[in-house]
């Protein structure tokens, strides 16, 4: 059975289960914010839908119902990285109010926000997608009717379900949310922030359940019987991970086999090489006055500790060549002095002849020299008689060249009548004759001269003073501050000023720019409107479709002649965009051509979309219809509207829209928006918000610097916003439909466009039946990603059978 068939089988296997909520998976907003203890202006406890839990009345616009930082952090930990959760609320929202039920956002990014718009009769779910884009899912439904409703939004990976009053209203497949929420995220209840999105009404039981199908706690009769969409996505993800592990393991196995083939017949062991001698692992040896061992290829030595020798009578302690500690040697008595084995003494007899004796086997034995004394080339006054030889030497004779016992780190020094050993600078003697010496750690013993801004590092026989980071060397022992600003070795933004400091530097944005100095952005006093970007102080670059010094003017592509729509369609100007919309009497055939060529006539007579009364006959026309009276009949010209008879010439206001006026004319119903006359003191301010002169009906722009009158509209972050009686309501900009496999949103625009190159696309319709074959000959599902073999920063993705590779953003 193939992998796809296996997935489908597992997805279709349903298992009955009960329902329970682990307290660790429940976030009760009322409990977390301790609303019952008071402390929030504009929030009072009232009678709720039921008496099992508390309800709170939210009113006014001066409130700030926000979770404390520590509480927010705890709630974030429960939600962070979760793919399944459910937002629950029982509420009664004031008529026509537009407000936020719950908002979880960081800076300008809304990670999870549930909003109800009474102005447009919509429920909106705002969140961040895994492609790091802000997304709004709109559900046409009115909650703001001053009636109690149970509301739940269940998210399971890319699956979203909206329940209202235990009825499944919408079920959609969307781009999966990105829930990697920063710890300093804000949690707001009943508002988006301190200035916008104020919910007005009563709320009860506002909770987040970190589990799928949490609506069952609200409506127990809706118990789950099958695995969730996230279960299926999780299974696909695990298979993708296994594919990646298989590819990496295959690569490692291949490299290991290559190495194994090269190691056939070899025996590998780490050894140590000292003075040309190779020692095996754990092998020990004596190096002068140190005992050394080869451990894992590294030489480790310890100084030998010599105990005081306990010599018997007739012996005396003395150093022996090749040994570190003194040994007991036989002694000889000569001239009233003790000599040890090997010592020589010269004496002269009565005839002034020199006789040489050596201590051997506890007695002195005469030594007969083989060669006569060499002739000296110095005056007799410069000649020296030695006690250990018969031949004289000149003053300054090089005794060291005749051989000595000074070992490593010890120097032989000539004296007037012999030589001695002296430890080199930076070493101390291991025994009293200085033949063996060890290194002195000047840093550990405080015997160094390193000054400020340096760090002492020990070296054999000496030490080094290393400059701290950000400093440059003055001499061997001291460092001074490095002027990183002057040298250009700083990370300040090009629009920032660099200030040199002790041990580093600081950055500060130039006047007209704002930021932390490392990143500085131009300031335009918040006046770049309609999504315009501030590129330099008070200089706005507008998004496509807008113009003006502050991008305040929408370009009307329809009026300015940029667009030529088909005769069966009409050009509709949109904020920053346009659309060729089918005229009344036409509809699109599904091809959605940009210029409206796909608009075709609607046969209102066949489809029943006509208002002809029973005494007339519907006759289809191009782009409309006609209600014709049969020959010989006397027709009334009445209309049928909403299954009610409207007489010819009758005028009425729609029940569903009090701002629309309809009339019956010769069997046809004609509707239009109410004409606003602001000079009329009785003008309906709901239908004509532009006629509302009250200051309380004005709205503040999101940046807090602009004020709009009631009825004004503007575009902000790809959303159409409107001020209605003091409340700001925003919804996603309408975009022309696109019917293609790969789409992308160009920089500075809001609507997606079709592209043919899948590697340019930021949105694709993933089809897991279309796989890719990677460099390991492993099949990858569409939507999966992996690091390309042999690289660390090349990220590859499978997009419906196409492999697209680019630099991993994590490496930048």
Image (cartoon, rainbow, N blue to C red):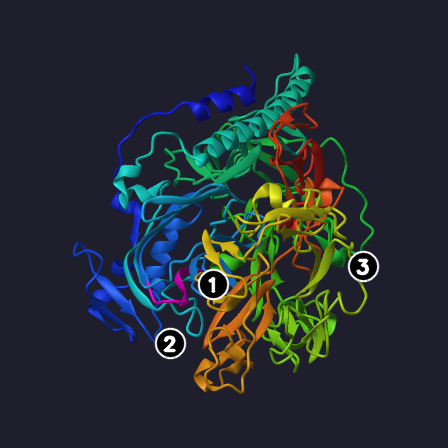
Horizontally, residue 137 falls left or right of residue 548, namely left
Which comes sooner in the sequence, label 1 or label 2? 2
Tell me the mark number nearer the camera, choosing from 3 and 2.
3
Provide the residue span drawn in magenta: 93-105
Type of secondary structure dominating the magenta stretch:
strand
Q: Which mark is residue 363?
A: none
- Where is residue 331? Give x, y as percent: 47, 35
Which comes sooner in the sequence, label 3 or label 1? 3
Horizontally, residue 270 falls left or right of residue 699, namely right
* In-front residue for pair 448/580: 580
Tell me the mark number nearer the camera, choosing from 3 and 1.
1
Can residue 462 be seen from the camera position used here? yes
- Residue drawn where x is 41% and y is 58% of the image: 142
- Residue drawn where x is 56% and y is 57% of the image: 637
Q: Is residue 101 magenta?
A: yes
Q: Is residue 609 magenta?
A: no
Is disc 1 surrounded by few (<14), some (14 to 19) or many (20+) residues within 10 Å? few
Task: Indicate whether 756 appears above or below 731.
Answer: above
Residue at mark 1? 654
Can residue 412 be seen from the camera position used here? no
- Distance in Å between CA atoms under marks 3 and 2: 46 Å
Is disc 3 surrounded by few (<14), some (14 to 19) or many (20+) residues within 10 Å? some
Q: Secondary structure at mark 3?
A: loop
- Distance in Å between CA atoms under marks 3 and 1: 34 Å
Residue at mark 2? 61
Q: Secondary structure at mark 1?
A: loop
- Where is residue 416? Give x, y as percent: 66, 55
Q: Which mark is residue 564?
A: 3
- Distance in Å between CA atoms under marks 1 and 2: 32 Å
Tell me the quarter of the image containing the N terminus: top right
């Amino acid at each position: 059975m193939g992998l796809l068939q296996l997935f489908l089988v597992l997805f279709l296997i349903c298992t009955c289960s009960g329902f329970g909520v682990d307290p660790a998976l429940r976030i009760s907003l009322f409990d977390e914010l301790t609303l019952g203890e008071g402390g929030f202006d504009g929030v009072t406890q009232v009678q709720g839908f039921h008496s099992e839990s508390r309800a709170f009345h939210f009113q006014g616009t001066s409130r700030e119902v926000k979770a404390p930082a520590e509480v927010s952090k705890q709630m974030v930990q429960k939600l962070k990285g979760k793919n399944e959760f459910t937002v629950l609320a029982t509420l009664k929202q004031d008529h026509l109010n537009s407000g936020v039920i719950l908002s979880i956002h960081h800076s300008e990014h809304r990670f999870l926000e549930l909003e109800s718009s009474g102005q447009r009769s919509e429920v909106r779910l705002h969140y961040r997608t895994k492609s790091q884009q802000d997304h709004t899912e709109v559900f046409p439904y009115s909650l703001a009717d001053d009636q109690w409703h149970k509301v739940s939004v269940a998210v399971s990976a890319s699956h979203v379900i909206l329940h209202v009053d235990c009825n499944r209203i919408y079920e959609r497949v969307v781009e999966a949310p990105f829930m990697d929420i920063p710890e300093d995220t804000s949690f707001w209840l009943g508002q988006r922030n301190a200035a916008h999105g104020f919910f007005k009404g009563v709320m009860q039981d506002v909770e987040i359940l970190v589990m799928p199908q949490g609506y069952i706690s609200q409506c127990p009769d809706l118990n789950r019987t099958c695995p969730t969409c996230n279960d299926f996505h999780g299974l696909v993800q695990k298979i993708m991970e296994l594919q990646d592990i298989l590819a990496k393991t295959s690569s490692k196995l291949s490299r290991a086999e290559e190495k194994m083939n090269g190691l056939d017949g070899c025996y590998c062991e780490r050894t140590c090489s000292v003075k040309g001698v190779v020692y095996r692992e754990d092998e020990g040896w004596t190096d002068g006055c140190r005992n050394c061992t080869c451990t894992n290829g590294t030489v480790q030595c310890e100084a030998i500790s010599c105990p005081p020798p306990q010599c018997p009578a007739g012996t005396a302690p003395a150093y022996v060549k090749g040994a570190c500690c003194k040994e007991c040697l036989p002694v000889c008595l000569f001239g009233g002095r003790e000599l040890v084995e090997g010592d020589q003494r010269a004496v002269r007899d009565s005839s002034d002849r020199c006789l040489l004796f050596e201590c051997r086997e506890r007695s002195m034995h005469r030594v007969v020299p083989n060669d006569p004394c060499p002739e000296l080339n110095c005056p007799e006054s410069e000649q020296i008689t030695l006690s250990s030889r018969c031949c004289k030497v000149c003053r300054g004779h090089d005794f060291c060249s005749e051989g000595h016992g000074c070992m490593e780190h010890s120097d032989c020094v000539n004296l007037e009548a012999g030589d001695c050993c002296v430890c080199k600078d930076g070493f101390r003697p291991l025994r009293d004759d200085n033949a063996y010496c060890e290194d002195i750690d000047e840093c550990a013993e405080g015997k160094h001269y390193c000054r400020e801004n340096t760090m002492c590092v020990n070296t054999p026989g000496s030490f080094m003073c290393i400059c701290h980071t950000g400093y440059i060397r003055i001499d061997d022992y001291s460092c001074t501050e490095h002027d990183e600003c002057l040298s250009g070795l700083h990370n300040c933004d090009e629009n920032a000023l660099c200030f040199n400091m002790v041990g580093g530097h600081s950055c500060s944005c130039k006047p007209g720019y704002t930021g932390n100095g490392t990143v500085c952005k131009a300031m335009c006093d918040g006046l770049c409107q309609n999504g315009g970007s501030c590129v330099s102080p008070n200089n706005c670059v507008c998004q496509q479709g807008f113009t003006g010094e502050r991008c305040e003017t929408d370009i009307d592509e329809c009026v300015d002649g940029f667009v030529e729509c088909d005769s069966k369609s009409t050009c509709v100007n949109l904020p920053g965009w346009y659309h060729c919309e089918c005229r009344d009497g036409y509809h699109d055939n599904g091809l959605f051509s940009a210029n409206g060529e796909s608009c075709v006539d609607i046969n209102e007579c066949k489809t029943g979309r006509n208002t002809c009364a029973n005494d007339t006959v519907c006759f289809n026309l191009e782009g409309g219809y006609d209600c014709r009276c049969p020959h010989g009949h006397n027709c009334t010209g009445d209309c049928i509207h909403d299954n009610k008879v409207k007489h010819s010439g009758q005028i009425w206001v729609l029940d569903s829209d009090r701002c629309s006026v309809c009339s019956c004319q010769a069997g046809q119903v004609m509707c239009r928006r109410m004409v606003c006359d602001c000079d009329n003191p009785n003008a309906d301010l709901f239908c004509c918000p532009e006629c509302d002169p009250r200051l309380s009906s004005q709205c503040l722009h999101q940046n807090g610097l602009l004020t709009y009158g009631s009825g004004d509209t503007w575009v902000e972050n790809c959303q159409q916003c409107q001020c209605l009686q003091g409340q700001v309501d925003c919804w996603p900009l309408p975009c022309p439909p696109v019917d293609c496999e790969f789409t992308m949103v160009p920089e500075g625009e809001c609507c997606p466009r079709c592209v043919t190159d899948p590697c340019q696309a930021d949105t694709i319709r993933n089809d897991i039946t279309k796989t890719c074959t990677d460099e390991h000959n492993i099949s990858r599902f569409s939507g999966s990603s992996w690091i390309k073999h042999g690289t660390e920063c090349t990220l590859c993705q499978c997009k419906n059978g196409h492999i697209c590779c680019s630099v991993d953003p994590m490496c930048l």
